[in-house]
Amino acid sequence: MIDVTLESVSKRFPRAGDTAAVDDVDLRIGAGEFFTLLGPSGCGKTTTLRMVAGFYFPSSGRIRFGAEDVTNRPPNKRDTGMVFQNYALFPHLSVAQNVAYGLKIRKVGRAESTRRIEEALGQVHLAGYGDRRIDQLSGGQQQRVALARALVIRPRTLLLDEPLSNLDAKLREETRVEIRRIQKDSGTTALYVTHDQAEAMAMSDRIAVMESGRVRQVGTPQEIYHRPATAFVARFIGRSNVLDLPVVAADAERVTVALPGGWEVPVAAPADHGLAAGATALVSVRPEHIALTSATAEGALTGRVTELEFTGMATNLLVDVAGEPVQVAAIDVPAGLGVGDQVGLRLPPERMWVVGA
Amino acid sequence: MSTIPATPSAATVPPVTDDPTPPSRPRSRRPALNANSRWFPYLLVFPLALVLFGYVVQPMLATFGESVGVDGPANWASFLTGDGVARSALVTSLLISAASVLLCGVVGVAMAFLLKRFSFPGRRLIEAIILVPAALPPLIGAISFQLLYSETGILPRALQQLFGTENPVLPFSGIAGVLVVHTFTMYPFFYLATSAALVGMDPSVEEAAYNLGAGRVRVWRTVLLPMLTPALVSASLLVFMTSLASYTAPLLFGVDQTMTMQIYINRTNGDLPMASTYASVLAVVSVLFLLGMRWYEGRRSYRSQSKGVASHRRELTNPFARWLALLASLLAVVVLLAPVATIALVAFSLDGSWTTEVIPSGYTTQNFVTIFSDPDAYRPILNSLQMSLLATVGCVVVGVLIAYAVRRLDFRGRGLLDVAVMLAWALPGTVVAINLISAFSTGNAFSFGQVLIGTFWIMPLAYFVRFLPLVFRSSSATLAQLDPSLEEAARNLGASWWRAFGTVTLRLMLPGVLAGALLAFVNGVGEFVASVLIYTSETAPISVEINNRMYSFEVGTAAAYGMLQVALIFVVMVISGRLETGGRASREATKWTA
């Protein structure tokens, strides 16, 4: 078990001009932690992972495994185990030979090697599959062989590059539980890359949300969901309404904002919000936290329903509040509610949160 | 006649990864040869670039230097002014090439449509043997057509006897003869490109046009033809280049006024500067075509990715049409196999027993005994095998590394390296020979100060230059289908660059490399065009010996040598077919289980 540190790591590609693929990233991944880099495609998460693996070298900054500086160390000297997006299994080798590849390079003895291969294949529920050819396995099985191959060398860090993106939806959910279990059992520090926020939330100890090469927020799934740092994070993780609201008063923990219709509510804010009366605050509120009520209810915003979509568990509404579209996810909807009807929306101040731009 | 590339053009194979980030240039502060050093690509590429410069580019420049050296202005003026031989040779060459494109286009596209769109008796057999005439080595191929269709050929004489006329009926001679050879040996460029396009085409696109109310002609004009255009254009360029480089057909049918023949004639008359001028002009035209081709291939091609309904063949139902189809198939089979059959027949004929008869009158197995037992006759076989093997080893080492560098490494000048290899492919064999003569008739740094002309080494060097692109192309095509993350996975598991390259990348490239190497080897054994300009009596290869025997009317012995080349080619074709079906089989398996 070892912790991984990135100190103001940047990566510029020679042909890509001045824009940095990864821009001044600072991260500290604790020993044994399951840490996820989450972001839309092109945000720099895979580039960051590949710098940790040693396939790219940072343009500036340092990468450390524990106290050891590995910034410019070639990939084969890093002792990381990587699971590739398309598994990258060697098609000319059997399952067991694939798993054995890293052991051979480490000159592990035959008996020890056989034992560890069996153990690793057992761990991923593929005991007895050692002699199979790679092309005789299903996608899910190939994925597990890739995991076994990465784990059998007892790597200092497990690196996973969107390992579930080639699996179908049901298998994806099964496998993410498996990966998490195996990672916990082995106690290996894991760095996981995905663009799927549900996957990230379900698996991770902590998540770093990236956008345009920068880390926008690092935190536990709960922190990121309930206390998004920026409007981007609020919208990327689940769905969110980010409202522009005038600030009436502000102190260190709270900002009082005026809702359309004149209601004033105190909203929790991060300590460094830097807002004062007269400024405009960005306030995030999740659709499922907004309650539907009658249009005339005390303290409620009134609006007109412009879209209505029944999804089974909930009904998604788009409500026009003084020209501003507000998303609402309601479990209970008054019978007969339709597009064009007036409704009241009750925003819960304790669920609202001031975000950065 | 050059060789059909082993794989559909590498440039149309889509890259495997869709990693949006560009490849990095690894950096490290460690000195020495380290695969992660920023200098590593250059350390690997530098010797390769040196080889290409020394044996491809520099000789070409030497030829140009030779052409402007003595009588330079006069040499070049003869192309630009007047109605001299030079001018008319250029025009004739271009006209023959244009006519070849037209003829090959008609035959190749028609064959592709018949075989890929219709189902009729004999179709499978024809598909199996359709590439046979084109697979023959250039000299023996052209000889077989001469034996079949010229004034003294089997068919005109048979028709003469059949109709009792005074002269042979329908003999091909001169430019018509050249065009027959070109059509038979080059239509596969069109056939292969068109059938690949037809097979790769999503039939629902055509169905959509019918569904929207278009008639058959309209569908052809507005859907099929536009979708085939990329295939047709690149096939046209290939046929044009190959015709321009064609040397054996004009030689055998006595068309002296072509570029390649003029190079040969001037060289044998000792006028190297004039030969060099012809070679330079031909090189410039070939390079222009190469660049045109690369530019065209770089554009989008219509390749549909849909895996919906598989295209189906139309069954012929009309009984009359079925009989007609059967008859036509039989005729096609006979025509396709006739060249090989002729060589085989003549190989068993008694030398001198064939004068005015339709086919030779006396038969013997002595020809084969002679070429294997008589030391003088045996020598060319040994020469060819030895020189070809040497060249192939060179082609594999250099070709595989260049393919790796071009596909997998990021360095300045990558495009140049790629162009330099393909330059070797675009240059006609005649030009390659003149280039080597110009460069190595005095010692230079690339020959370690030795004069290579008149030695053994010039021959394998010429083969190396001519057939390097074959190994490069097939290696590069296999590499394009290999996911780069396989090598990364090996590196991640602790393998050094060399180990990862050896145990994963090279190992997986092996079928492609082997196919390319076999192709280079048989092409070396069949080589004639460059050899005839640079051989010595000590180093005469099989094809030159065939040519000499033909001149001394030992047709039977010549054909016996030819049969050796043909047999070797068929062995190699079978092995390559195995390599390919092996690869395809495992791909199929992946598709079904994944």
Image (cartoon, coloured by chain):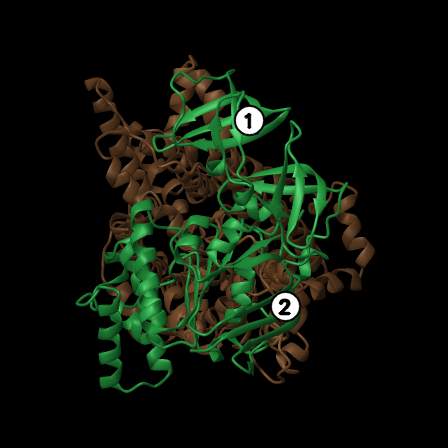
Mark 1 chain: A
Q: Which amino acid lies under the numbered mark 1 shown in the image of this protein?
A: Glu
Q: Which mark is residue A187?
A: none
Question: Residue B315, how many percent across, how many down?
Answer: 24, 25
- Report whether mark 2 lies on the same chain as mark 1: yes
Q: Earlier in the sequence, mark 2 or mark 1?
A: 2
Residue at horizontal 42 percent and vertical 52 percent from the top = B7
Question: What residue would you read off at disc 1?
Answer: A298
Q: Nearer the viewer, residue A97 or A188?
A: A188
Regarding residue B373, the answer to whether it shows in the image is yes
Circle 2: residue type: Val
- Residue B535 visible, this angle: no
- The mark tally for this picture is 2
Question: Which of the pair B519/B515 is nearer the observer?
Answer: B515
Quadrant location of residue B155? top left
Q: Which mark is residue A9?
A: 2
Residue B577, given in percent of the width and then of the height, sits at 30, 55
Residue extending farthest front: A298
Q: Chain of mark 2?
A: A
Check disc 2 and report its element: helix, strand or loop. Answer: strand
Q: Residue pushed farthest right? A: B73
Element carrying mark 1: loop
Whether B352 is drawn above or below B179: the answer is below
**Residue pictured at 44% horizontal, 20% vertical:** B219
Pinpoint residue B14: horizontal percent, then vertical percent. 48, 48
Number of other residues with Cα within 10 Å of mark 2, as a class: few under 14, some 14 to 19, many 20 or more: many
Of residues A109 and A234, the one nearer the viewer is A234
- Name of the residue lying farthest toward the left: A128
Does A172 appear above or below A121?
above
What is chain B's hue in the picture?
Answer: brown
| Chain with green colouring | A
Which residue: 44% across, 16% down? B217
